[in-house]
Amino acid sequence: MLRSHTRIAVAGSVHFVTTVTRIRGLWFTEPQLCEKMLEMLERCRAEHELDCLGYVLMPDHLHVLLRQTGDGTPITDVMEQFKKWSSRYLHPCDYPCRP
């Protein structure tokens, strides 16, 4: 059964977001890649006036807790932008996949 839900995009709303890497590659095992991903997350956060309440960057996925404070851009749009930026930087063939 599909769930029906409403997306909330108002100042003060808090969102728990999980996003995974393509083909669940072990991308975030190298410090320079972790730093680059966090820079991109910070860029999105600042551009859309979000508060980052916390994050966990795992080898193949990211959890982030965001609070909307500014322009009311839907979190889905923010994450789409983040994924576009990160996919331009990372290349799936360069990093090992899960065994």
Image (spheres, rainbow, N blue to C red):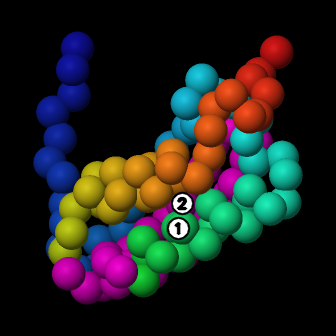
Identified at 46% across, 57% down, the residue is 85
Identified at 63% across, 32% down, the residue is 92
The answer to which of 93 and 54 lies nearer the viewer is 93
Image-based side of 22 in relation to 46, left or right: right
Give the image quarter of residue 34.
bottom right
Mark toward the start of the polypeptide (1 vs 2): 1
- Residue 27 visible in rendering: yes
Q: How crowded is mark 2: few (under 14 residues within 10 Å), some or many (20 or more)?
A: some
Q: Is the magenta stretch mostly helix, strand or loop?
A: strand
- Residue 17 visible in rendering: no
Image-based side of 96 in relation to 13, left or right: right
Residue 77 - label: none
Look at the image and give the residue range highlighted in magenta: 47-71
Give the image quarter of residue 37.
bottom right
- What amino acid is found at the position of numbered circle 1 in the picture? Leu
Reply above or below: 28 against 92: below
Q: Mark 2 points at which residue?
A: 64
- What amino acid is found at the position of numbered circle 2 in the picture? Val
**Residue 94, percent from left and from top:** 74, 34
Q: Tell me if label 1 and label 2 are in contact, CB under 8 Å.
A: yes
**Residue 24, percent from left and from top:** 64, 28
Q: Is residue 55 magenta?
A: yes
Nearest to viewer (mark 1 / mark 2): 1
Image-based side of 12 in relation to 21, left or right: left
The answer to which of 76 and 84 lies nearer the viewer is 84
Pick the quarter of the image with the N terminus. Answer: top left
Image-based side of 94 in relation to 14, left or right: right
Reply above or below: 24 against 7: above
Residue 41 - label: 1
Pick the quarter of the image with the C terminus. Answer: top right
Q: What element carries label 1?
A: helix
State how far apart marks 1 and 2 are (Cα). 9 Å
